[in-house]
Structure formats: structure tokens, C-alpha cells
Image: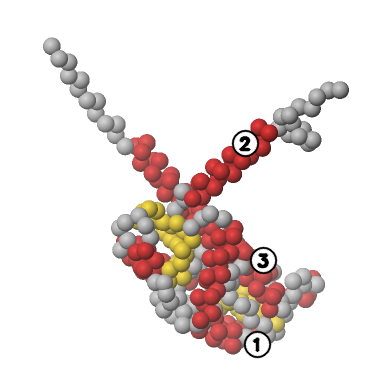
Amino acid sequence: MTPSNPLHDESGSTHLDSTAQIMDRITSRLGTQLSPTLVLVAHGSRDPRALTTVTALAERIREQRPGLTVRLGHIELNEPLLTDTLAAQRPGSAVLVPLLLGRGQHVKRDIPAAAAGAPHLDIRVAAPLGPHPLLAEALHARLVQAGWPERPRGAGARRGHAVVLAAAGSRDPESAADTETAAELLAERLGVPVLPAYAAPTAACPRTVPEALEALAAAGRTRTAVAAYFTAPGRFATQSAAAAPWIAAAPLGPHAALARLVLHRYDQARDRARDQARDQARTAPAPAPQRRLTSV
């Protein structure tokens, strides 16, 4: 009778393989623990549902990446404020991910100013969430939840459909350009016209939600939905939904695609910081050799 090999189990794998897998898990966990803190930067709202929503999004992000430290800070209206969140952090590194959907004054001015007020932290500010295909995925899912046909029956069934992409609005033309791109991404996904409009119109974002609905109706679109291009409920999202002649989708909220996008922006900023540090180390001049003194 041939004795069994104690290094192999019934599947033929070895204990050494199991040890390697355990070491891989330990290394991965240590790497996560050493990663910069992820600070979610929400706008803030007087609507109590907003804080509940961004807190749920933070929990979903923790589920997707266990071990990563995730904190929350608000630009205004809700606690904790971003400045307080940063002040409470121990010295170390952090990546700030704006829960904002385009380039505007909060991204360009307010968040960097808060970061500059925390000199005990090595801070990187990630890009805003939009525009990105993952947002189109989440917007599509919210529309389906509201009653949008998940699988329209041919081009004829879509002929009367359209979407108004309701956003907050901004004085920054780059923010308007980002919303236009987001509308294009959603139109490609749905196969129907998507017209961006704004709850707080400005010179850069002049079209209101009712105006967009009227324009689509004049073009023969009789089934127009309103998609909420907001991360959380608030006054603008409620105002936009009230104008919908058919269905109005909920804000993006703690959708899985939004959580993935937050982590993607975090990874981009973290990796960019590492690459810059590596490049600086490579290009730094070598220290001058020290003269060796020889005693006589």
C-alpha cells in the first residue's frame, strides 16, 4: 500500500500552495491598510435624505474594498464639514474624491482650499466623478427603476422616447461641457435623444428643465423622462422631478456603479502621486561623495 503524500490533498494541490495564497491575502490586506485615507467630499444639503444617501454610498465603498479607511466631509450645509474631517485626521496621506459630477468652483477652488488648510496631511484631490460611462450605467439603472423600458421593441418603440438630464448648473463653462458629455454618453447607451438642462440656470448653463421638455415635445417626443444627474436628493433634484411629464428617476445615490467610479477616481489619484514620487526620486541629483579622511 503506497503511503499518501502529506504535502498533497485530494485535489492534488499542496500545502505550500495554500501558504502562498494566505501570504497573498496578508500582503493585499497590509497594502490596503497602508493606502491613503479616502475622503468623500459631498456638497451638502438641507434635505435630510442627502446625508443618509452619501453615508450609504460610503458603506457600499467599504464593502467593495474592505480595509480601506473611508471618511466623509461636506463642503457646506451638513456635518461633518470637510475642514473638520481633515483636521481630525492623524498625520498621513489622504485622497479627496469629490462627489461632484463636473468641473466647477467647488472642485477648482473650495476643495483645494480645504486641503491647503490641513498641512499635517499629504493630500491629493481626485478628479470629479463625471463625465464617465459608469455614470451612464447608473443613470440608466435609475431610469429603469422609475419605469423606463429596459428593452425597447425596436427603433419604432423608441421614436417617441427622450430624456432630459437634469443637473444643478454652474457658472463654469467647463462644468457645462462635462454635463453635455454626460448627456452624450447616456444617449449612446439608450439610443434616444438626451438633452441636458439645469435646475439653477446660468449664462454657462442657460436651459431650464421645463424648456428642455418643451423642446423635446415640439420635436415629437411624447415619452420624455427626467434623469436626475445628482449624487443625492436635494432641492434641485426634487424641483426637476416635479417638472417631469412622464417618469422621473431617482438621484444616483449608493448605486454599485457609482461606488466603483469613486474607487476608480481614488486609484487614479493615488497612483499618480506614487508615479510622481518615483519620478522625483529618479531625477533627484545624487549626493556628492564625501571625502574620506585618512589619518597619518
Asked whether 194 or 290 is in front, the reply is 290
| Image coords of residue 180 (percent x, y) | 54, 70
| Image coords of residue 101 (percent x, y) | 50, 68
Instruction: Please tell me which of labels 1 and 2 falls first in the chain.
Output: 2
User: As shown in the figure, which amino acid type bears the numbered disc 3?
Assistant: Arg
User: As shown in the figure, which amino acid type bears the numbered disc 1?
Assistant: Pro
State how far apart marks 2 and 3 are (Cα): 43 Å
User: As shown in the figure, which amino acid type bears the numbered disc 2?
Assistant: Ala
Q: Is residue 231 left or right of residue 142?
A: left
Label 3 sits on residue: 189
Label 1 sits on residue: 245
Residue 280 lies in quadrant: top left
Taking the spot 78% from the left edge, 75% from the top edge, the residue there is: 156
How crowded pointer 1 is (Cα within 10 Å; few <14, some 14-19, many 20+) is rated as some
Taking the spot 56% from the left edge, 43% from the top edge, the residue there is: 26
Taking the spot 76% from the left edge, 27% from the top edge, the residue there is: 5
Q: Nearer the viewer's eye, disc 2 or disc 3?
A: 2
Instruction: Please tell me which of labels 2 and 3 falls first in the chain.
Output: 2
Can residue 136 be seen here? The reply is no
Label 2 sits on residue: 20
Position of 274 relative to 262 (above/below): above
> Mark 2 falls on what kind of element?
helix
